[in-house]
């Protein structure tokens, strides 16, 4: 291979194997002669590969073709009806939602949607919401409480939109309102980090009774580049910042910040959306079923206790 980095070599081979398998399935051609040795080499390299660095996992969370929130909705939901607008200013395409059936169960969806191609990524600002996005989320949570719909939130953003107009329209206040509203939901709430979970922009819809994360996603108070720019005045030191932030799924599970790590197919979710969707759907459905046994008062107590217990401090 052209790459000198073993991890990059493995990712390239995994991508090539995925393409060949997809071509064989689509065309009906027998490509076993090409697939078999490639699969054997991929398995050999996987066995030799050391544990991925935190920065490598961040890169997988950003991999081209990684499933977006709507990709999972397409595979796991039926009857999704998108509701628009915050009833104050505008509609925000970066944070969308509405009622749907999650594997048959009625729910209210909150989705941070990055977009798939250049046009839609620009339209959705790469999943970074303006204040009207978070106010729309509050409106949908109000509806969820009114109609008794559990909330499922798919988190995927580097952070709230940092533009001047967003600040003028009360970005910080809108995020705080969304966090407060979600904390006080009287219905079950499950939040899943499916890619990137940056700062308050992610936390705004991330305070569920259960917080789950996909294997190669990350969740942190700041992106590695942002932390590196502040600490070392050099965004190129992002890999070093990623190690210090302990922002990967295994880190977060060890720290008690998430309840479960959802496995991805070998090589990352971007190589097989269907294989990535299956365990995500099962995990969310299982947690919704467990939470459905609790009454509203118990849901509130559990959610509040979970977030009050986070962190370490000393009373002086």
Image (cartoon, rainbow, N blue to C red):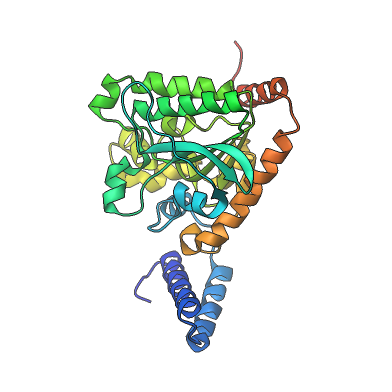
On the question of residue 311 being in view, the answer is no
Q: Quadrant of the C terminus?
A: top right
On the question of residue 78 being in view, the answer is yes
The residue positioned 31% from the left and 23% from the top of the image is 89
Seen as rendered, the residue at the extreme left is 164
Q: Nearer the viewer, residue 139 or 125?
A: 139
Q: Image quarter for residue 136?
A: top left
Seen in the image, is 118 located left or right of residue 193? left
The residue positioned 41% from the left and 41% from the top of the image is 241
Vertical side of 70 occupied by 43: above or below:
below
Seen in the image, is 224 located left or right of residue 141? left
| Residue 183: image location, x then y, percent | 57, 23
Seen in the image, is 119 located left or right of residue 293? left
Vertical side of 29 occupied by 162: above or below:
above
Seen as rendered, the residue at the extreme right is 293
| Residue 66: image location, x then y, percent | 43, 55
Q: Image quarter for residue 290?
A: top right
The count of marks equals: 0
The residue positioned 50% from the left and 53% from the top of the image is 74
Q: Quadrant of the N terminus?
A: bottom left
The residue positioned 53% from the left and 55% from the top of the image is 75
Vertical side of 174 occupied by 258: above or below:
below
| Residue 29: image location, x then y, percent | 48, 86
């Amino acid at each position: 291979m052209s790459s000198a980095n073993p991890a990059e070599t493995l990712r390239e081979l995994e991508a090539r194997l995925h393409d060949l398998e997809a071509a064989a399935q689509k065309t009906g051609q027998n490509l076993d002669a090409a697939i078999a040795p490639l699969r054997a080499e991929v398995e050999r390299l996987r066995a030799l590969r050391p544990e991925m660095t935190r920065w490598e996992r961040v890169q997988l969370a950003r991999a081209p073709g990684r499933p977006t929130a709507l990709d999972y909705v397409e595979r796991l939901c039926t009857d999704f009806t998108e509701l628009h607008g915050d009833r104050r200013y505008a509609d925000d395409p970066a944070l969308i939602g509405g009622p749907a059936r999650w594997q048959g169960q009625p729910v209210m969806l909150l989705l941070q949607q990055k977009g798939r191609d250049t046009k839609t990524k620009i339209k959705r600002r790469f999943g970074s919401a303006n204040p009207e996005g978070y106010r729309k989320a509050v409106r949908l949570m109000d509806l969820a409480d009114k109609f008794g719909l559990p909330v499922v939130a798919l988190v995927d953003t580097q952070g709230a939109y940092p533009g001047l107009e967003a600040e003028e329209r009360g970005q910080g206040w809108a995020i705080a309102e969304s966090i407060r509203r979600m904390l006080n939901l009287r219905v079950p709430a499950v939040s899943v980090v499916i890619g990137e979970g940056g700062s308050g922009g992610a936390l705004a819809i991330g305070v569920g009774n259960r917080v789950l994360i996909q294997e190669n996603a990350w969740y942190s108070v700041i992106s590695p580049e942002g932390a590196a720019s502040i600490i070392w005045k050099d965004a190129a030191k992002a890999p070093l910042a990623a190690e210090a932030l302990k922002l990967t799924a295994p880190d977060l599970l060890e720290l008690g910040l998430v309840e479960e790590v959802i496995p991805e197919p070998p090589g990352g979710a971007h190589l097989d959306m269907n294989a990535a969707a299956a365990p995500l759907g099962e995990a969310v459905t299982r947690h919704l079923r467990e939470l459905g046994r609790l009454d509203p008062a118990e849901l509130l107590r559990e959610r509040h206790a979970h977030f009050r217990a986070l962190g370490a401090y000393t009373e002086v």
